[in-house]
Image: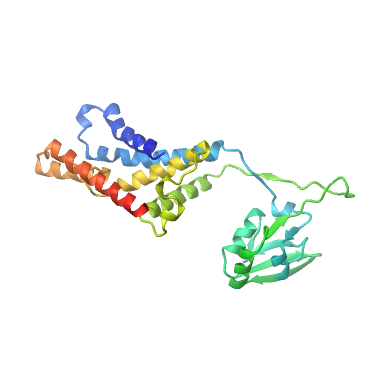
Amino acid sequence: MIIIAILLHILGNCLPKWLVSKVKHNNHILKLSGLVFDFFIAFLVLFLIHLLSPKAHYIDNKDAIYGLEFNQTMQQLGFKNEDKIISVNNQPVKDIRKINVDILMNSNSEIKIKRNGTFKELKITYTDVAKILQSEGTPIKDIFKPTPEEKNAQEIKQTQEKFSFGKVLKNYQNNIKEAYGFIIPKNDYKKVGGIGGVSKNFSFQISFLPFCCIVIGLLNLLPFPGFSVGNFIISLIESKRGKVFNFKLKNIVGLFSVSAVIIIIFYIHY
């Protein structure tokens, strides 16, 4: 996918030459076309993935008519099967899938539950979160009662996820953060297979393309020859001095600059 991302970047650099007149080829802004194209393609692919992928179903909290089921650790913390969680830290719970995340992502949580028609508040501390993380099974899940054997049993309504532009933006933002963390890593990528540690599954590779495009885009923000911003700066300097630099020399310096950055990245990851 990184090779495809590089080819897309080259395409982005070439597009202006095909679409605009030769008179405008010297426009400094066109030096940034590949950079802009990288981020545009990343966003477009993420948008299409969200738009075309099958929408998952979830149980809205109000539709969990039989309450929730708790693992042994959660029960030791005061929860009982068939309890209904109303809110976490005064935030109403809508999607049952997010309850576990809301609790585990906060070191101290105040949870309002409904038990046998009465309301009660339970607290989860940092120590409790550690216990939950070490426990077996899903901490909280919805209860499905078998309809054939149960009298007056009702089928639990499931809600289908809707397309959300906000999720696309959030995913895009996360990809930018991950790409930045890849270029300037805080973690040891050697432990997770380095650059080559990518699944061969086709759908996963497609979802990996935006990440690769953003990596290329971020690298082209470097103010060095051979990268978009670097070439943009050189173009401005040439315009100010009224004379272009030697074409062959620019290519050699640009190739050296790009090669040096690639070597540094490989050194970091391997």
Q: Position of residue 192 (x, y in %)?
A: 46, 53
Between 59 and 198, the one lying in front of the other is 198
Between 119 and 194, the one lying in front of the other is 194
Q: Position of residue 249 (x, y in %)?
A: 13, 40
Between 261 and 157, the one lying in front of the other is 261
Residue 230, visible in the rendered structure: yes
In the image, taking residue 183 as reference, residue 79 lies left or right, namely right
Residue 78, visible in the rendered structure: no
Task: Give me the residue at 30% from left, 47% from top.
Answer: 262
In the image, taking residue 104 as reference, residue 206 lies left or right, namely left
Task: Give me the residue at 29% from left, 48% from top.
Answer: 263
Please tell me whether residue 236 is drawn above or below residue 75 in the rendered image. above
Placement of the N terminus among the 4 image quadrants: top left
**Count of marks placed on residues:** 0
Q: Position of residue 144 (x, y in %)?
A: 77, 51
Asked which quadrant contains residue 163, the reply is: top right
Task: Give me the residue at 78% from left, 54% from top.
Answer: 65
Between 148 and 157, the one lying in front of the other is 148
Q: Position of residue 174 (x, y in %)?
A: 46, 51
In the image, taking residue 30 as reference, residue 241 lies left or right, namely left
Q: How is the image coloured?
A: rainbow
Residue lying at the far right of the rendered structure: 151
Please tell me whether residue 121 is drawn above or below residue 173 in the rendered image. below
Asked which quadrant contains residue 44, the reply is: top left
